[in-house]
Amino acid sequence: MEAGPKLDPDREQAILGATLELLAEGGYDALRLDAVATRAKASKATLYRHWPGKADLVVAAIKCFEQADLSRNTDTGSLRGDLIATLRGVRELMTGPTGQIMSGLLVAVQKDAELAEAVRTSMLEDKEQVTQRMLDRAVARGELPADTDPTIFPEIAPALLFMRIFVYGSAVDDGYLDHLTDDILIPLMARRFGD
């Protein structure tokens, strides 16, 4: 998505860090590229050269500073282990500073088509690839049927964690992650289409 020569890593970190700081302070609607440029001690032209718009910059900032690198290949040797490891990463993300920003972005996504498109085509595609790799490994090990619905994990797990953390204000301890994995996710994923 970057359109110009590669930015110096320190300069990029300054810009993306300033973006997150301003998001945390005022939310997506109030975020202005000139304010990001001022805080990062960069020119507005530099921002536009590397990120075509505000939505692209915000997505890049969130992806860069996610506390849990959910795009890494977490292969624990079992489906259950992979699910627990991934859920722990999602928990860390949602309960950290980036989680607060992302919860605020949910409102903005409903009102801003450009942001919604950037989130769908960038951040969600990354998560779908992680899920598909996890499913492919489980199918190869014989833990899941080949026709396992690939939408179960990305639709159910984040939704339940989001509700528990942001709506109910309840803790998401390892016991809850075990319950989510053993009693909900694995049984649903192990079902064959049409059962």
Image (cartoon, rainbow, N blue to C red):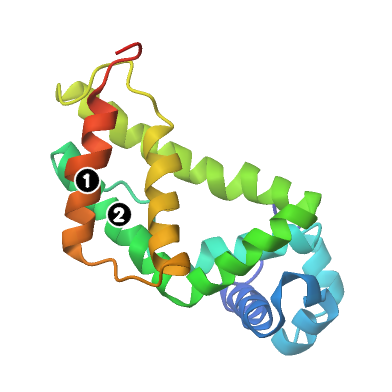
Q: Amino acid at mark 2?
A: Leu
Q: Which residue is mark 2?
A: 87
Q: Which residue is mark 1?
A: 181
Residue 87 in view here:
yes
Q: Sequence-wise, which precedes: disc 1 or disc 2?
A: 2
Residue 153 drawn above or below residue 163: above
Instruction: Find residue 183 and report its image quarter.
Output: top left
Q: Amino acid at mark 1?
A: Thr
Residue 29: x and y, percent?
A: 79, 71
Is residue 131 rendered to the left or right of residue 59?
A: left
Assess disc 2: are there few (<14), some (14-19) or many (≥20) residues with their C-alpha within 10 Å of its C-alpha.
Answer: many
Helix, strand or loop at label 2? It is helix
Is residue 88 rendered to the left or right of residue 107?
A: left
Write the residue at 49% across / 69% down: 99
Mark 1 touches mark 2? (CB < 8 Å)? yes
Write the residue at 44% across / 37% down: 129
Residue 62: x and y, percent?
A: 56, 65
Residue 153 drawn above or below residue 174: above
